[in-house]
Amino acid sequence: MTNLLSRFSYNECNISEVGKGTLEYIRSHLKHLLPTMSGNSLTVSPARIVDREFKQPLLCGPGPANYWPAMNDALTKWVISPMDDEYFWVLQDIRAGLQYAFQTSSPLVLAVSGAGHSGMETVISNLLGRGEKLLIASRGIWDERACSMATRYGITPIVHSTAMTSTFSLSELEEQLKVHRPAALFITHGDSSTGSVQHLPGLGDLCHQYGALLIVDTVVSLVAVPFEMDRWGADAVYTSLQKGLSGPAGITPVAFSARAEEKIKNRKHEPPFYFDMKLLAQQWNCYGDTRSYHHTLSPPLLWALRCSLQELCREGLEQSWARHTAATARFHQRLQTMPVTFLIPKPEDRLVTVTTVVIPKEYDQLAVLKHIRDKYNIVIFRGLGPTVGVALRIGLMGVNATLQVADQVADALEDALLTLKKGKL
Ligand SMILES: *Cc1c(COP(=O)(O)O)cnc(C)c1O
């Protein structure tokens, strides 16, 4: 395809160069615009936006992860208009890829514009209205966020907490469902603030038994840890592109079960216009070829999501789960030879994408992060929410879930602990 804009030049549209006829047209019809275009009348001058040197780091925190190599191509593909056939083919590819990623045959599957939080906002605001009860199983920062969102919508949050180093048993959740009879239960599958993974099989049935819908945050677990939406009876699920899917943040997959669809169809409340699943479903052709315009989806982000799903479908979920497990197992094995401990005591509760590592008190945590960044150009994170000052968060996900990267991070951490010990201890 030829590039229609290959001849673009700033000069071509200089007022002094447009030619006599056009200039006369401007003078007679657009005279009022000329003073603003002649300079000296603006109160704010152009900003100095300079290019800076920036070497791509290896991103081994709790997200974002580095991109798939194919992403460079995807992000520079041509712009598609929200009325073109191509656009709807891309949406169709994405929905099919997402049904595979979530393991659902539900039609109400699409991606909302926004980072992971927009998925949280979408599921909560579409399913629950003012005065309805949302039971929140809380063990990290994401559950706190769900609680603030619910409160803003006038939903009644009921928070059931456990220690940040553990997860929930089905029997304690059943007790909560029985006592409170909430409209829905919110739970985080992989918690990147604490580094734990919640066991989910059986929870969907329990929720349904007590008349509740099951909402699951799979932002940092999907494609890395087994998750099967239909088989496990999850009713509303969201993930993100920037973690296991190794793409840019800014577009967020969501999926709703038949039960959740029913609830949306019969709800009495209105969610925010921007996140209304009834309207978005018409834009994404969830129920036939409706093609209705809702808002302009970002073309590079659509191409990016499509690219990640293409990578996933090529590799296969089972292989992706196995690769993430192998990489993290290698990293954990290496940690066992260092003077550090796991924040999460039970190995079966440890999240495969994000490991929370406790280093001895004598070390300055920020100095460790700085050493690893400055010497190895590897980014790892400090704690977040309940783990601030308690543990470092080290992530291996998406394209970074390899034995090689596991060793690179382990080498860097080992070196930091040795080097910084000399001066400090
Ligand atoms: C990263 C993360 C989020 C938030 O994602 P954003 O893209 O930053 O909005 C939500 N939940 C979990 C479990 C996460 O790890």
Image (tube, rainbow, N blue to C red):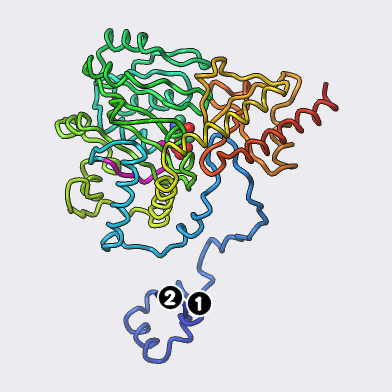
Relative side of 259 to 381, left or right = left
Q: In this view, does 209 lie to the left or right of 331?
A: left
Q: Is residue 68 covered in magenta? A: no
The structure residue drawn at horizontal position 48% and vertical position 47%, both measured from the top left corner, is: 247
Circle 2 sits on which residue? 3
Indicate whether 171 appears above or below 157: above
Tell me the kind of residue under disc 2: Asn
Res. 82 mark: none
Residue at (47% x, 80% y) in the render: 7
**SS of the residue under disc 1:** loop
Provide the secondary structure element on which disc 2 rests.
Answer: loop
Q: How many marks?
A: 2
Q: Nearer the viewer, mark 2 or mark 1?
A: 2
| Residues drawn in magenta | 109-117
* Residue sitting at the far right: 422
Q: Which amino acid does label 1 sit on?
A: Tyr
Residue name at image x 47 percent, y 82 percent: 12
Q: Which residue lies furthest to the left in this view?
A: 266
Residue indicated by mark 1: 10
Q: Where is residue 332 in the image (x, y as percent from the top left)?
A: 62, 26
On screen, residue 341 versus residue 80, left or right, reads: right
Q: Position of residue 41 (x, y in %)?
A: 50, 69
